[in-house]
Amino acid sequence: MAVRTPLVRLGTDGGAAAPAIYLKLENLQPIGSFKLRGAANALRAQDPRDLARGVYTASAGNMAQGVAWAARDLGVAATAIVPETAPSTKLAAIERLGARIVQVPFERWWQVLVERRFPGIDGLFVHPCADRAVMAGNGTIALEVLEDLPQVATVLVPWGGGGLACGIAAALAALRREARVLACEVETAAPLAASLAAGRPTAIDHRPSFVDGIGGKGVMAEMWPLAQRLIAGSRVVSVAAAASAVRLLVERNRVVAEGAGAVPVAAALAARDLEGPVVAIVSGGNLDSDELAAILGLA
């Protein structure tokens, strides 16, 4: 279902002193995002009788696609609770995969993640990040990275709810403890950086941007202990830096990344203190065509 994605060297003008940066191209998954790994693992781990009533998730778009794909493969109904800010590219993909869409305000959407339920919808709720089976599926990315680049020293991972970063970090902790995992966030929504600075989960003022796949109102209570134990820190980049990384990936590597997928690349390019080799997880490529055109200066 999920495919093994390539690890390629990022084409940059970095000098000899700059660490080698590699891209883990999860944008090449069938749904354009790593989310298929966790969604498929979570659904396949369930008793078929528990799936009979259908499944649903709360997602800005990519996890919804993953759940829809896996549910279709298993022959069960799927529903996606999405924020009103979800981009049209992701909404269209969810519909193509046969899932029902329920759009709600961002605040209400976030509450679904916290409460793990949505009144009026029956079925099994698949949490997009805090489900252990989802994190285990995400952790397979680390296994592939280690096979292709055994000496990896630093892995940069976008931080949304933490399921990707913690899944990868847990696998690396077991197999290569020397490797550090750094979460990457955008300045308009960086709850982990704020929480690490405060020493406790901290609410933030979330501001929407084209980087729609990461950033929430805070760090979820169940993810905070994992983040403290597994994540070496957070790197925060500007929206402009994320857009520049999108443009660089297109121009140098012919790779289309959505905002969340470009943030680790932006963080890698901004830092000179990273021990290499560095791997940036390009988590997805579901970027609206109009947004891509604007970033490339074609609009």
Image (cartoon, helix red, strand yellow):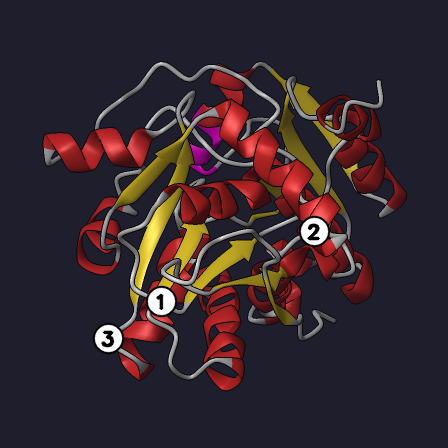
Which residue is pictured at 75% across the width and 35% down the height?
A: 90
Residue at horizontal 60 percent and vertical 42 percent from the top = 57
Q: Report the amino acid beneath label 2.
A: Arg
Bounds of the magenta segment: 111-116
Q: How busy is the neighbourhood of tag 2: few (under 14 within 10 Å), some, or many (20 plus)?
A: few
Q: Which residue lies furthest to the left in this view?
A: 199
Q: Which quadrant: the N terminus?
A: bottom right
Q: Return the residue at label 1.
A: 276
Q: Where is residue 148 in the image (x, y as percent from the top left)?
A: 54, 82
Q: In which quarter of the image is the C terminus?
A: top right
Farthest front residue in view? 16
- Is residue 59 among the parts visible in the rendering? no
- Judging by the rendered image, the residue that carries numbered circle 3 is 178
The amino acid type, in three-letter code, at marker 3 is Glu
The residue where tag 2 is placed is: 252
Please name the predominant secondary structure of the magenta segment in the image: helix
Query: What SS does tag 3 mark?
Result: loop
Based on the displayed image, in which of its 4 quarters is residue 25 positioned? bottom right
Point out the frontmost of discs 3 and 2.
2
